[in-house]
Amino acid sequence: MVRLLSVLLVIPLLASCTSILEGTAKPGVTLEKPGPAGTVPAGLEKFYGQQLAWQDCSSFATTGSSRTAYGSKRDVECTRLQVPLDYSKPDGDAITIGVLRYKATGQKIGSLLINPGGPGASGMATAAGMVSDYRKTDLGKRFDLIGFDPRGIGASDPAVRCLTGPERDAERLDLDVDTSAQGITQTEQENKAYAEKCAAGTKFGASMLANMGTRDVVKDMDVLRSALGDAKLSYVGYSYGTRIGTEYAETFPQNVRALILDGAVDPTQDQLASLVAQAAGFQKAFDEFVKWCRDQRDCPLGDDANTSFRQLTTPLIQTPVSVGNRKLSYNDAITAAIQALYSEQLWPLLLDGLNELKKGRGTMLMRLADAYYDRDDQGNYSTITDAFSAVHCVDDPRLTDKNALLETAKKYKEAAPFLDDGNPPGAPLDSCAFWPAPVSGRTEAPKADGIPPLLVISTTGDPATPYEAGVNLAKALNSKLLTFEGVQHTVFLQGEKCVDEIGVKYLIDQTLPADGTRCA
């Protein structure tokens, strides 16, 4: 699956029903009520026109990484947006969505919402990290930059919680590489227990899990659009964020102003085909890393790089490497490599990590794996991994055909030989097979009916969402495709001048590039 890679309430929340009341500003709090704006669904007026209480973001930070991202920033402000837990019961329980804003410095067009993907990544932290570069662009003058933590994630409340920090550490050491009948049974028992822990550890339990999907996130996003005072939505979605953008456009076509979908999830592939395509994408990125590595002075990969990589990493299956009071597992080493293959900028860190591993050390690989899981130095994890499962399990059909799973496991190993752990392919049921909430995601391909042409960006060497996925999404949505020739996952607003100029022009004046436009 795709991954890329909290608050003082002025608005009271009653225990068993929804009540949105306008408050009086407290010291350090700015109250604003620019909404409702645009189309407002019947029965949701109190949400679409709610008052927002903007304040310092330090109390919204939930992990070390979020404290670093926005805990001490003085050029951003945060609030909580109240939404129904279940949109079919708008007068029932309510939850809140964490929102971060960097205000436009010039003549404002509106708000620009950002989602970094995952599912499970924090939009608040992503937006805060973008501010220093964002303010230098014309977007910084024309749009408030808005990052939000989707429901159940990060600073949103309640957050999905399945495992504690120590339990997650232990999970990373539990390899589940035994593909014997006994090993498969054990893995499935663990996956079933994980699903049960997600329901037990999350407020509202199975009801929250049932309403964690993209179906509900796009409704939250429309409430946010209106509460911010925007009649139509401007949005940038990366990776899984392209799925959010696509579903938003299908659900609220009349509310679309300009959407950029970068690093697309392929709307034409089923899950199993998508997994194999992603394996091939990471193999392609690994091959490019190997070419770069061999130009360096100390590349540890020999003539057969796949074999060399496996010889470095598979001994960890039997003997993890000590890193302080922790141990680097085989899973951690593979996760570290995957993390580094998302971007050429991380290749030097992977090179250092492999050279360390060759000498029996694992510090750099552990750092890369911790970054992927968003673990801080105190052993606290963000919600990203648990939320990934929670969204995936209600968005996508259950995978229970073991013959199909086994065939996919074989194809995965063939598509990415550098990731082959040497064990026979196995087909255990994942945690979604035991999930205590029904599937609610769309299963049909997207339709462009009523949707204005959008901008889809796809990178030729994207390891996580292969290039053809963007081609297929642009075709399905009757939208424009911008091709970037490179090896990385997503590209817009990441320093590539050609891509940024086209994307900024589209967001500001809604001018789309010509067919066949490419940037290198």
Image (cartoon, rainbow, N blue to C red):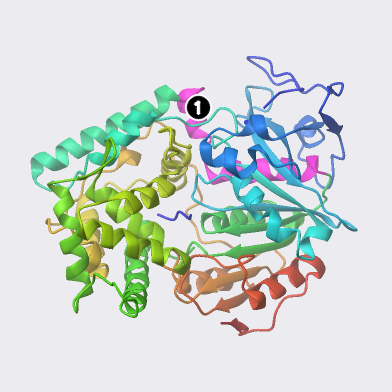
| Relative depth, front residue between 430 and 327 | 327
Q: Quadrant of residue 255?
A: bottom right
- Secondary element at image label 1: helix
Q: Quadrant of the C terminus?
A: bottom right
**Numbered range of the magenta stretch:** 202-228
> Which residue is rendered at x = 40% and y = 66% of the image?
348
Assign the magenta stretch its main secondary structure: helix
**Horizontal side of residue 401 vs 205, given as left or right:** left
**Which x, y percent locates residue 285?**
37, 71
**Which x, y percent locates residue 447?**
59, 63
Q: How many marks?
A: 1
**Which x, y percent locates residue 378?**
43, 32
**Which x, y percent locates residue 336?**
34, 55
> Which residue is rendered at x = 63% and y = 14% of the image?
15
Compared with residue 173, is residue 12 higher up or lower down, i.e. above or below?
A: above
Compared with residue 253, is residue 7 higher up or lower down, i.e. above or below?
A: above
| Relative depth, front residue between 311 and 98 | 311
Residue with the mark numbered 1: 207
